[in-house]
């Protein structure tokens, strides 16, 4: 028996399908037994639930042989560390493996922890299957691409494996979770779900944890497969709205047109993340098709009110393009969420004032826009598509330090304690966000628990 754990990352009312664990479970061999345990569910006690299953199966023909944990930076890491520690203390013979953004970005502190036995970097489906062979003694861990392991007390991290697109793996086994408990009301609908139709991002923004963890690469599933999954949730479970958690939902216009055509009959209202420049390349016909398909709100990384700063970020975007996008969304009745990263280290005060002035200009173009604010924190970047993460000299060496409030704020971009951002500048941004248009209410994506790509 394999237990796949989703440590708490959000409040129960913001819980969402554990898509990554469903994907992993679907890829396991047919003879493997597995179960998902979700710490985001109401009244969940992940330690007790895991311990109960380990004890119940201890003297059976199918004992628990592996506990897998998906770990994002920020709140989920804060939950995962004490959980893994307690499980290892209680069941020292049960291997624990971490996967997800945090171990992909920072493998060394994970492997230093005595309560984590293995980690998976990058795409994990094939690596997890091959790890089962390692545990069964059928192969050496050094032969498993994407695996982090320990040898003689020393950390070893193998090269990652080339990516495969979602279509290379089996369909999601929706029957493995209680779908009803995850369909929660939001401003979009009474039964809002989530979905992800691609992995990665093709762009190269140098502050982004997605690029640092996965490289500049993106693989999409076919629109037909996306439609089949959404149709199942609509027709069998009454889902009426969906948030797409793709890091970049649109790339090529024909793909967007086909998605819109397939989604229109489903009657969903939906949200996604998108690139400003990519959507500006779409024709008015495609914009209208997306509107008819239910696209209600889209999240755009505008990031700065300065073209110079955008160049430094490798954003490959201009402020004029952001203004043009604001006008386009207004014309088609799609609400834009614009995120901005305040506090360029070279001139934080000037950057804050320039960007706030630009936001006012943007709001004049589209009064319905929503403002999402973050503070600039750097993320170590890769050398090459499948290269190593280039570590920052100042990042913590242990998981315990990573879970302190100071580093949690750094990971979420929300309140980083960095020397170039004094409290008065943060307050300036916060006050502006509160008073813009008489008080800006948090956008629906924030209320739903949407997370910025990790620091």
Image (spheres, helix red, strand yellow):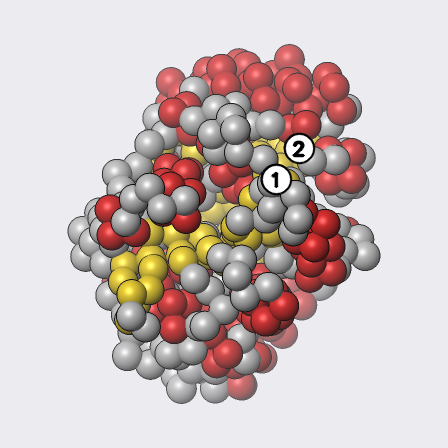
- Residue 103 location, quadrant: bottom left
Q: Nearer the viewer, mark 2 or mark 1?
A: 1
Element type at marker 1? loop
Locate residue 57, reporting x and y percent. Answer: 67, 47
Locate residue 221, reporting x and y percent. Answer: 42, 25
Q: Is residue 354 above or below residue 386?
A: below
Q: For residue 61, which numbered disc appears in the image? A: 1
- The residue carrying pointer 2 sits among few (fewer than 14), some (14 to 19) or many (20 or more) residues within 10 Å by Cα, namely few
Locate residue 297, reporting x and y percent. Answer: 60, 39
Residue identifier under label 2:
176
Q: For residue 338, which numbered disc appears in the image? A: none
**How many dots with numbers?**
2
Element type at marker 2? helix
Measured in 3D between alpha carbons, the distance from the residue under mark 2 to the one under mark 1, in whole angstroms, is: 22 Å
Residue drawn 43% across the image and 20% down it: 222
- Residue 191 location, quadrant: top right
Looking at marks 2 and 1 on the same chain, the residue that comes earlier in the sequence is marked by 1
Is the C terminus in the top left, top right, bottom left or bottom right quadrant? bottom left
Q: Is residue 54 above or below residue 202?
A: below
Is the N terminus in the top left, top right, bottom left or bottom right quadrant? top right
> On the rendered structure, is 238 left or right of 19?
right
């Amino acid at each position: 028996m394999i237990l796949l754990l989703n440590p708490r990352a959000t409040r129960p009312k913001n819980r969402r399908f554990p898509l990554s664990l469903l994907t992993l479970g679907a890829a396991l061999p047919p003879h493997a037994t597995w179960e998902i345990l979700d710490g985001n569910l109401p009244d969940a006690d992940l330690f007790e639930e895991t311990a109960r299953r380990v004890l119940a199966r201890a003297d059976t023909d199918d004992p628990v042989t592996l506990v897998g944990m998906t770990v994002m930076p920020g709140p989920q890491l804060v939950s995962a560390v004490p959980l893994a520690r307690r499980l290892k203390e209680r069941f020292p013979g049960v291997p624990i493996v971490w996967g997800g953004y945090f171990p992909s970005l920072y493998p060394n502190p994970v492997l230093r922890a005595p309560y984590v036995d293995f980690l998976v970097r990058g795409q994990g489906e094939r690596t997890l299957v091959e790890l089962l062979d390692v545990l069964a003694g059928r192969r050496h861990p050094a032969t498993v691409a994407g695996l982090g392991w320990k040898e003689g007390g020393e950390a070893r991290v193998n090269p990652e494996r080339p990516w495969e697109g979602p279509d290379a793996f089996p369909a999601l086994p929706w029957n493995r979770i209680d779908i009803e408990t995850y369909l929660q009301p939001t401003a979009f609908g009474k039964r809002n779900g989530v979905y992800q139709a691609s992995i990665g991002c093709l762009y190269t923004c140098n502050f982004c944890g997605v690029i640092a963890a996965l490289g500049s690469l993106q693989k999409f599933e076919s629109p037909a497969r996306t439609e089949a999954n959404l149709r199942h949730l609509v027709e069998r479970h009454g889902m009426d709205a969906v948030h797409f958690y793709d890091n970049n939902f649109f790339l090529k216009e024909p793909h967007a047109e086909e998605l819109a055509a397939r989604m229109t009959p489903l009657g969903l209202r939906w949200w996604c993340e998108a690139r400003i420049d990519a959507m500006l390349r779409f024709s008015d016909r495609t914009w209208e098709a997306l509107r008819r398909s239910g696209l209600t709100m889209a999240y755009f990384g505008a990031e700065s009110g300065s073209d110079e700063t955008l160049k430094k970020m490798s954003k490959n975007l201009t402020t004029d393009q952001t203004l043009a996008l604001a006008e386009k969304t207004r014309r088609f009745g799609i609400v834009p969420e614009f995120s901005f990263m305040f506090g360029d280290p070279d001139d934080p005060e000037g950057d804050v004032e320039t960007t706030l002035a630009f936001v006012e200009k943007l709001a004049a173009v589209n009064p319905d826009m929503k403002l999402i604010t973050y503070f600039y924190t750097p993320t170590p970047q890769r050398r090459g598509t499948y290269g190593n993460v280039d570590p920052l000299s100042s990042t913590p060496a242990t998981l315990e330090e990573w879970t302190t409030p100071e580093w949690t704020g750094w990971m979420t971009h929300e309140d980083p304690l960095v020397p170039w951002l004094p409290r008065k500048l943060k307050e300036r941004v916060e006050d502006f966000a509160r008073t813009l248009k008489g008080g800006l209410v948090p956008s629906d994506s924030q209320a739903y628990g949407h997370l910025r790509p990790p620091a």
